[in-house]
């Protein structure tokens, strides 16, 4: 087999493999995400974590008071990008119990989840946003000029 026929045989297959890697599916993307949560137990606010994560990577958060052997809560978020939406798995553990839910969210969407045995027992409000978006920048007030805000600091010695 000469070089020309070898190239003709392998080149189309190599091109297909390369094309598969270059045009990775949307759900395989790794996108920075912002999560704002409110956790309520029997209507009482017990946590308000605000977290940065990434699609395709599990995010774990825990709050523990100094010297405590048991955390106030443990939160595990597993987001996966699927086209325009995100599939999200939520696991929450408290000393009194735990809850689990799976849901689909769009960028900027907020949902309320019931994780307890009865409605209102353990409730989570969840907002998901893409970090590099106009909505996120507006939320963080990154584009707004606020009086009294220091824009830059310089120092000379």
Image: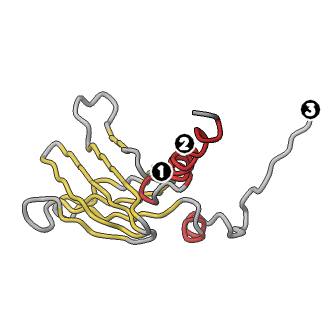
- In this rendering, is residue 59 above or below 102? above
* Image quarter (top left, top right, bottom left or bottom right) of the N terminus: top right
- Badge 2 crowding class, 10 Å Cα cut-off, few under 14, some 14 to 19, many 20 or more, is few
From this viewpoint, which residue is outermost toward the right? 157
Secondary structure, mark 2, is helix
Give the distance between the C-alpha atoms of the residues marked 3 and 2, in whole angstroms: 64 Å
From this viewpoint, which residue is outermost toward the left? 117
According to the picture, the residue beneath numbered tag 3 turns out to be: 157
- In the picture, measured across the screen, residue 2 lies left or right of residue 148, that is left
> Residue 55's spot in the image, x, y percent?
43, 52
According to the picture, the residue beneath numbered tag 2 turns out to be: 10
Quadrant for residue 27, please give it: bottom left
Circle nearer the N terminus (1, 2): 2
- Badge 3 crowding class, 10 Å Cα cut-off, few under 14, some 14 to 19, many 20 or more, is few
Secondary structure, mark 1, is strand
From this viewpoint, which residue is outermost toward the front? 1
- Badge 1 crowding class, 10 Å Cα cut-off, few under 14, some 14 to 19, many 20 or more, is some
According to the picture, the residue beneath numbered tag 1 turns out to be: 52
> Residue 139's spot in the image, x, y percent?
54, 68
Residue 59 versus residue 9: which sits nearer the camera? Answer: 9
Of the two numbered discs 1 and 3 in the rendering, the one whose residue sits closer to the viewer = 1
Q: Residue at horizontal 60%, vertical 70%?
A: 134
- In the picture, measured across the screen, residue 28 lies left or right of residue 63, that is right
């Amino acid at each position: 087999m000469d070089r020309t026929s070898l190239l003709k045989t392998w080149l189309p297959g190599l091109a297909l493999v390369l094309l598969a890697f270059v045009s990775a599916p949307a759900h395989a993307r790794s996108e920075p995400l912002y999560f704002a949560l409110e956790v309520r137990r029997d209507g009482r606010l017990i946590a308000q974590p605000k977290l940065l994560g990434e699609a395709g990577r599990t995010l774990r958060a825990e709050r523990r008071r100094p010297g405590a052997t048991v955390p106030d809560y443990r939160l595990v978020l597993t987001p996966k990008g699927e086209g325009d939406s995100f599939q999200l798995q939520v696991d929450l553990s408290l000393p009194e119990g735990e809850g689990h839910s799976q849901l689909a969210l769009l960028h900027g969407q907020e949902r309320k989840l019931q994780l307890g045995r009865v409605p209102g027992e353990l409730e989570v409000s969840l907002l998901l946003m893409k970090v590099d978006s106009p909505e996120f920048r507006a939320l963080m007030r990154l584009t707004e000029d606020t009086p009294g805000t220091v824009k830059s600091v310089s120092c000379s010695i």
